Image (cartoon, coloured by chain):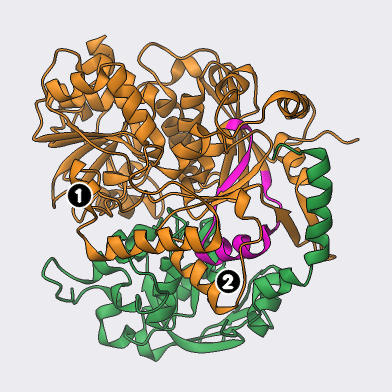
Chain colours: A orange, B green
């Protein structure tokens, strides 16, 4: 048999039909659904008198536009947001799919809830009407975002019409220096490949530095595969993966666990598998990084300076000029001297317990030096655990707002938004113009770096605080 | 789905790279539970000021581009989120075809589900079409999906590639779900086999 990559193996195991022209039907094991990209899909089913083919493989949770202030238990004030969440309540009930309603303690960001509840398992195909579905690739699952028409297609048929993508290997060798995290890895990869570097490819992250990451860290890395242009990013499962999964509510148990484990252990790329593209970064050379522009590829080590537009080529010259104007930055300005108004810690990129622990370690006994700072846990269970571990007290004493779970200021669909010109240190995934609110200026970074910025009031090299 | 066969129309030039889906349709317009009505908010933050007034310099606000049916743009168009609201807004505005050197995968796919043809051409050909587009109403661009060509008013013809299945669906206006449900037997037998091999799923 010819050697295969992990992606090849998962693809082959889910091929339900292949037409003569190469168009494939890929079977979907888990379909995650949220309130923003699903109402039109359910409406489409109703209009065509169709049902959900596999309700037991379909899991829904509202996350994008739910408020994260404690008063949300009394109901959602914004009428449009309320209608969307109520539509999901009704669709979940009408079509009989698994559901975590807004006031369930298990509610949270769909990409945090899936793994937390054991829905996401190695070797699965996972889709969701959200580009950060790539997160689930951390388990060695083929996971990617889809549009609403495809959401409807998966609801109706449990398959997707697909053509196979190319294989791209991203290897991070060696070990990370102190203060360098999974977020710095994933941002540095995008910095090296550009936001279109992975287009048409599925990325497999590998190498010693990736193996050394926890599941939380691996999810952070895969989460941003899409920011590098790849619909999916994945990491071969290992003991760290199995340990994380074991005992979760929807993980296999008993004899099924053993059977699953046997199969999961075959899920790796063969030594001589073919790669269409290979990128290698040395772990030792990755620094704590921040973004300075309006594209995730605009990333530099924290001790660098804002670049000059003329140092770029092609369409990027104008793009950088526009970005610096939008960001209110000057070429040559030291990144570590850029003052911050606001800090946002949360999102499907960095809203897990380990992220909160990293932030708490910096914030312990300190006070914020910014106008506002908020921590939005990725799920109700993450929030509960952080309270149990005493992290919530550290955040509150430092001056952070301690919120309920949701996507919040990552995309600012709920009331958590930046004002024009407001500058934010954020642990989320996109620094696009207007992403966190019209005119808002976003700098992406790790949770520890965001916490450090909160304490000093400027972008800060975490290594100075260690 | 609305068919796409041929199109002859005015092309609006948007010479920016990495046009992301947040630019195409900002998040505040994702709260709708419908697919229609988003055209007025296409490129909202570039198109209107803080008070909701049109910014005259923005291409789609210029008189000659208000009825544009084609958009010519830079590399990596449609990057960012999976929101299908982006192609819904483009279509609702009246644009049926985008021409750029490259696209983000999810956006590219979403276009075909909505009767929009995204055409990828080499940078030098996009540059020619960008210059054509800058002539406004004086230069119509013709797109022929069957022949897979884009033609300028000066007679230059560029060929483009498109997946045969996607082309077929767009030419005929076919509904994907109906096509897949016709293969229900294949899905049934896959499901039965998978239930044996991976019962824990």
Instruction: Give how far across and how far down residue A10 sits, in percent.
Output: 73, 41
Between A436 and A108, which is closer to the camera in this rendering? A108
Label 2: few (<14), some (14–19) or many (≥20) C-alpha neighbours in 10 Å: many
Please give the name of the residue rendered at 44% of the width and 66% of the height, measured from the top-left corner.
Answer: A39
Between B87 and A72, which is closer to the camera in this rendering? A72
Are tags 2 and 1 found on a single chain?
Answer: no
- Secondary structure at numbered mark 1: loop
Which disc, if any, is residue A417? 1
Residue A406 position (above or below residue A360):
below
Residue A9 position (above or below residue B96):
above
Q: Identify the subunit bearing mark 2.
A: B
Between A290 and A91, which is closer to the camera in this rendering? A91
- Alpha carbons under labels 2 and 1: distance apart: 33 Å
Please give the name of the residue rendered at 36% of the width and 46% of the height, measured from the top-left corner.
Answer: A295
Identify the magenta region: A139-166
Which disc, if any, is residue A265? none
In the rendered image, which quarter contains the N terminus of chain B?
Answer: bottom right
Which disc, if any, is residue B112? 2
Instruction: Give how far across and how far down residue B8 sits, in percent.
Output: 51, 89
Query: How many labels were placed on the picture?
Result: 2
Please give the name of the residue rendered at 69% of the width and 36% of the height, measured from the top-left corner.
Answer: A123
């Amino acid at each position: 048999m010819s050697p295969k990559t992990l992606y090849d193996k998962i693809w082959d195991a889910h091929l339900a039909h292949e037409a003569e022209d190469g168009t494939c039907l890929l079977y979907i094991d888990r379909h995650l659904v949220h309130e923003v990209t699903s109402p039109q899909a359910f409406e489409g089913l109703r209009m065509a008198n169709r049902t959900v083919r596999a309700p037991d493989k379909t899991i829904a949770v509202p996350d994008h536009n739910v408020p994260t202030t404690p008063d949300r238990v009394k109901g959602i004030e914004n009428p449009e947001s309320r209608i969307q969440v109520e539509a999901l309540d009704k669709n979940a009930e009408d079509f009989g799919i698994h559901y975590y309603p807004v006031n369930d303690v298990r509610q949270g960001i769909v990409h945090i809830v899936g793994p937390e509840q054991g829905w996401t398992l190695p070797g699965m195909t996972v889709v969701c009407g959200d580009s950060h579905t790539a997160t689930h690739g951390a388990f060695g699952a083929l996971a990617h975002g889809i549009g609403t028409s495809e959401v409807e297609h998966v609801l109706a048929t449990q398959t997707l019409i697909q053509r196979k993508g190319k294989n791209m290997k991203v290897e991070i060798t060696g070990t990370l220096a102190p203060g360098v995290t999974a977020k710095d890895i994933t941002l540095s990869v995008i910095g090296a490949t550009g936001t279109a570097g992975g287009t048409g490819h599925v990325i497999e992250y590998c190498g010693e530095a990736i193996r050394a990451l926890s599941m939380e860290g691996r999810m952070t890395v895969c989460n941003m595969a899409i920011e590098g242009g790849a619909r999916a990013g994945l990491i071969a499962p290992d003991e760290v993966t199995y340990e994380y999964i074991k005992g979760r509510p929807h993980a296999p148990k008993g004899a099924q666990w053993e059977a699953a484990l046997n199969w999961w252990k075959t899920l790796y790329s063969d030594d001589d598998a073919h790669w269409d593209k290979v990128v290698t970064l040395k772990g030792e050379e990755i620094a704590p990084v921040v973004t300075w522009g309006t594209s995730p590829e605009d990333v530099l080590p924290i001790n660098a300076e804002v670049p000059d537009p003329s140092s770029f080529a092609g369409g990027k010259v104008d793009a950088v000029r526009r970005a610096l104007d939008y960001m209110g930055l000057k070429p040559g300005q030291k990144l570590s001297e850029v003052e911050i108004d606001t800090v946002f810690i949360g999102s499907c990129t960095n809203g897990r317990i380990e992220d909160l622990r990293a932030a708490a370690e910096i914030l312990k006994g300190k006070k914020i030096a910014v106008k506002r700072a908020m921590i939005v846990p990725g799920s109700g269970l993450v929030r509960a655990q952080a309270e149990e571990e005493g992290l919530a007290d550290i955040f509150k004493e430092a001056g952070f707002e301690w919120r309920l779970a949701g996507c919040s200021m990552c995309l600012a669909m709920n009331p958590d938004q930046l004002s024009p010109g407001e500058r934010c240190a954020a642990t989320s995934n996109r620094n696009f113009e207007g992403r966190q609110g019209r005119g808002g200026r976003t700098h992406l970074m790790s949770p520890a770096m965001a916490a450090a910025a909160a304490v000093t009031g400027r972008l800060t090299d975490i290594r100075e605080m260690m | 789905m609305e068919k796409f066969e041929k199109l002859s129309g005015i092309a609006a030039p948007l010479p920016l790279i990495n046009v992301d889906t947040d630019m195409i349709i900002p998040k505040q317009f994702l709260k709708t539970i419908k697919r229609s009505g988003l055209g007025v908010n296409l490129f909202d933050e570039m198109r209107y000021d803080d008070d909701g007034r049109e910014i005259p310099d923005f291409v789609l606000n210029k008189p000659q581009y208000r009825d544009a049916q084609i958009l010519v743009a830079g590399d990596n168009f449609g990057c960012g989120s999976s929101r299908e609201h982006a192609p819904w807004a483009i279509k609702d505005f009246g644009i049926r075809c985008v021409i750029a050197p490259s696209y983000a995968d999810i956006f590219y796919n979403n276009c075909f589900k909505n009767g929009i043809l995204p055409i990828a051409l080499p940078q030098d050909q996009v540059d020619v079409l960008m210059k054509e587009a800058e002539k406004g109403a004086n230069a119509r661009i013709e797109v022929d999906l069957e022949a897979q060509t884009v033609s300028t008013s000066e007679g230059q013809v560029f060929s483009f590639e498109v997946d045969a299945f996607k082309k077929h669906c767009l030419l005929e206006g076919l509904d994907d779900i109906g096509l897949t449900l016709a293969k229900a037997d294949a899905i049934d037998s896959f499901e039965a086999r998978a239930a044996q091999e991976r019962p824990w799923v």
